[in-house]
Image (cartoon, coloured by chain):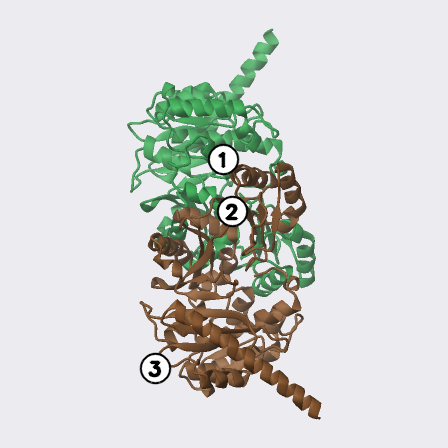
Chain colours: A green, B brown
Amino acid sequence: MVGDLAILSPDYRRYVGNQAQRMAWSLQSGDVLVLPVEPDESFLRYVTSQLKIERSSVEVLVPPPGIYGDGVLSRDRLADEGFRRRLRRVVAERDVRKVLPFHFDSNIVSLVKWLGLGDVTPGFGFLEQGGGRLLNSKSTFRALAGGAGVPVPEGKVCSSIEAAEVFMWTELLSRGFPGILKRDFHVAGFGNEIVSPVSDVEPIGALRTVVVDDRAELAKYLAERWDWLTDGGCRPVVIERYFVDSVPICAEFQVDDQGVEQTGHGEMRMAPVLNGHVWPAPSCDLPAFGLFLEAARRLCGPIHAMGYRGVVSVDAVVTPDGDFLINEFNCRVSGSTHAYHIAERVVGLGKSWDRVLVEQRRCTFPRVSVAVKALRQSGLAYDHDARCGVLIAVDDNSPSGGFGEYCVVAEHMDDAQAIEAEIADLFAAITESIATRTFDAGAGA
Amino acid sequence: MVGDLAILSPDYRRYVGNQAQRMAWSLQSGDVLVLPVEPDESFLRYVTSQLKIERSSVEVLVPPPGIYGDGVLSRDRLADEGFRRRLRRVVAERDVRKVLPFHFDSNIVSLVKWLGLGDVTPGFGFLEQGGGRLLNSKSTFRALAGGAGVPVPEGKVCSSIEAAEVFMWTELLSRGFPGILKRDFHVAGFGNEIVSPVSDVEPIGALRTVVVDDRAELAKYLAERWDWLTDGGCRPVVIERYFVDSVPICAEFQVDDQGVEQTGHGEMRMAPVLNGHVWPAPSCDLPAFGLFLEAARRLCGPIHAMGYRGVVSVDAVVTPDGDFLINEFNCRVSGSTHAYHIAERVVGLGKSWDRVLVEQRRCTFPRVSVAVKALRQSGLAYDHDARCGVLIAVDDNSPSGGFGEYCVVAEHMDDAQAIEAEIADLFAAITESIATRTFDAGAGA
């Protein structure tokens, strides 16, 4: 989804690979979990106990490291013969009939076919003929959004540098608006840049902000970056108005043979730092929210009709004026999918939610057994009776630290924030005490 | 639709430009017709009289020749300022509210927007954001056909040369089947080649047939042609099994806000020469025809849901076994659209047809006034009472000749073929007599 994996630093690849532990929250009894990085056994016991399933009822497989190491499930790793044979055996033993990959790309298609699961996989006919790639394109999003008539940022799919310059200058920069330029096939902002007529525009969802003062500077920027923006002239680039001080939100849907079902909605946490999500989206109190949800569901109509089956995550920005503008969809497991599984399977939330879930990413944890014990002793751990407390969503399974994620379940946002402060203190204290003890032990040796 | 117009010979561009006269059969009172080549006034009077509308009720505009001459409506011609101003004035005077281009590409989108007709054009939101291009892709066809589960030739969308070689060899050539390789964005066979393990495979709908004897030769072929097949690595290539001795047929649908309506179906004439179509398709008597029509309509479902509005032409082949396999759709005016308009507006055919229409392409005619008179005198001209006879569908408006098209309306195929033989004799006699007279006149001068 990022094109060449080599553009990701080894550290970032490990971060992303570690994040794959989120998939553990989707486990059900009898499942097989394939991960890029070997998880800590304590973490698996912790998650399965929260999900109230037996640890022994699920199998975890990790293919050998590949050309990009063990951070991501690269194609060569999924093609490893020993891994494939083990997987096929386990799939047969357990009579597995459903596949939930993070993203149904051509490598997963070939693996699923090899496992003999193509016929039972909903939407496989579409995926097998490149449907995943088709929907993973930002120009496809623009066309379908235009077709569905949903509110989107002013924008254009540009195949020529002349068209890009005219649109960018006439419709955006000359009117004082920044624009975001999106490469057709990239994920998580890795293919996006912002071009702005004013400085101090923070590049949220983009690599950087480039300030241009006049049309000549814009032309110079486009000439320099056109090759990168268009994959060497191969693909169009999507240009949209970029809204400063807007809040990114997302609504998630499950698209299956029966139709389109809303799963939930969330919002990116912008302050004090950009760190994780909160579910449900606090913006749901705004007057236009109902119309946004209706539009997001309408956009799933063509995706369903085209033959895709699975998760659809619809992204939007809430402008300072309270308008909701849809700016992307993603047909894959999203950064919220595990949270909806936690909400449903651990917290027991259904159609109407009486809890908020708040996520912190890039946290440093002690070893998971220590962290879980500390949470329990301090009374912060998730309590199944009170349906409140802290869950370790992703183990900080990295020597350098900072890859962990936790999720606070609370009745109100205020409570959640109070708990977050307590956790920070608790983990800081543990880390310090471990460091001291290690130091003491080292000194005493 | 062919990528670079320069790949077409000047002669072929004039042929295609001349063919645009078919659009005259879609005229209704008050319309404005834009053509690449100035039509003969006699032809316009002929068509309007057949359609029972006043010649004076329609306006015909031809923009000045462009960088590719006057054969095709290239972008520069549609952008010509004088033409645009004239068109806008006429559109305003006549209160025109509907646009029927041959293909709704980005040039037409920009013209329609400039004319202020975007808001009243169904599907404009989709088209404005590159929807036309999205649907004009053969890989999109494969994904949507896979999603709709319609019968298609065994095939694959290949992004890598390795995948292409494996599929082509394992699934096709080694089993004795030829394959057709289709570039993603090309029309009318200009981007298709056939690769066959046996010789004597006629390349219908393709540029040529390449015979390969073994896998090494296949690898060599792919290595040589990969750049061409993939537009320099930019696009995937679609590979499908190619059926020798199969008959190409097409079903046409009108997709509008209300839904999907079938317009008709036709078949390509394969013998004695590949020349034009016959409507309805004679294959409609085969047992599987009903299922094919149902599948073709199902395939229009996602196209409708995506937001396209207009003509959808679904192509298929009828194999020697009587199977119908869908191998393409085209979201634009087709080579049959004018015939359905003739059938409806001239012959008065509705849901059930009591006539067949048979087309001859690439015919040489005398001047249209002479040809019409000769048809009338010989009793071959279309008769509105008998609802039978010959219509000149496209004037042979070219000094070199051979660009004309006529359409025979008859009760049965046998009658139509008898009339065809008579026309051939008639036109041959006229051409000879004109040549003789011209020679005599020249000799006498």
Tag 2 near tag 3, CB within 8 Å? no
The residue at which mark 2 appears reads as: B240
**Residue A266 visible, this angle:** no
Considering only vertical position in the picture, is B370 above or below B216? below
Quadrant in which residue B390 is drawn: bottom left
Residue under disc 2 on the same chain as residue under disc 3: yes
Give the SS element for disc 1.
helix
Say which quadrant the N terminus of chain A sits in.
top right
State the mark number for residue A110.
1
Say which quadrant the C terminus of chain A sits in.
top right
Q: Nearer the viewer, mark 2 or mark 1?
A: 2
Q: Chain of mark 2?
A: B
Q: Chain of mark 3?
A: B
User: How far apart, in angstroms, are the residues tagged by discs 1 and 3?
Assistant: 62 Å
Q: Amino acid at mark 3?
A: Asp
Q: Nearer the viewer, mark 2 or mark 3?
A: 3
